[in-house]
Amino acid sequence: MYGQNQYGTKRYAAGTSDREREEYYVNLFPLVPAFVAEKKEMHALYDTQGYEVGYLEHALEDVIDQCFITSATWGLTRWEKFLKVDTNLLLTYEQRRELLFAKLRGQGTTTVEMIKNTAEAFSGIEVEVIEDAPHYRFTVRFVGKKGIPQNMQGFVTMLETIKPAHLAYDFEYRFTTWQEAVNYTWEEAQRYSWEEFRILEEEKTCY
């Protein structure tokens, strides 16, 4: 399916709403002599072509957007095929882009720095990777922000593809500690839900 119609069963732009066509309208009348544009038949022709030219310009920009992961939407499927990343349409565009960027960063021999870069590509926050070579494992510690980053399942999937098979791993996250919590009065703490308080970044110092 492409949009709401079976791909190839509708004419180009046939599924476009009037509102969308109005948005992309290009005024062609200044490009022709006034005595031509004033003719009833030509006026109708240029008016109709204005919508088609406008939508064609929009479609061309949309195609160009698909050439870049940061702006691709329907073109993400081609990027995923090219980088051998499983397509999951249940993920948002942003989550799928994170997977692709992580795969690009994860090319080559797996190192601590590669895992760090991959984790930071997903979470957008600072990450530490702690090796435990004697026990064949490592820990990914998210230190830049409290809480569990979004799209962790996607990160786990990507991590499984780039790490050596014999290495185990675990994750560590930051949450509000009791030492931080005691700096708040009961009234102040009640302004937040428990989930909000656990990841509260505001640091309050008692004097």
Image (cartoon, rainbow, N blue to C red):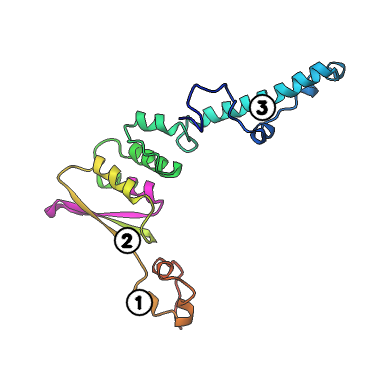
Q: Earlier in the sequence, mark 2 or mark 1?
A: 2
Quadrant in the picture for residue 11: top right
Q: How many marks?
A: 3
Query: How many neighbours does mark 1 have within 10 angstroms: few (below 14), some (14-19), or many (20 or more)?
Result: few
Q: Secondary structure at mark 2?
A: strand
Residue range highlighted in magenta? 118-139
Residue 147 x %, y %: 37, 61
Q: Nearer the viewer, residue 8 or 128?
A: 8
The residue labelled by disc 3 is 54
At 34% across and 76% down in the image, what residue appears?
Answer: 178
Sooner in the amino-acid sequence: mark 2 or mark 3: 3
Kind of residue at disc 1: Gln
- Up-down: is 203 above or below 80? below
Nearer the N terminus, badge 3 or badge 1? 3
Q: Where is residue 194 shown, x and y percent of the image?
A: 40, 71
Q: Which mark is residue 146?
A: none
Crowd band around label 3 with a 10 angstrom C-alpha radius: few (<14), some (14–19), many (20+): some
Residue designated by label 1: 179
Q: Which residue is mark 2?
A: 173
- Quarter holding the N terminus? top left
Depth-wise, is mark 2 or mark 3 nearer the camera? 3
Amino acid type shown at disc 3: Gly
Helix, strand or loop for disc 3: helix
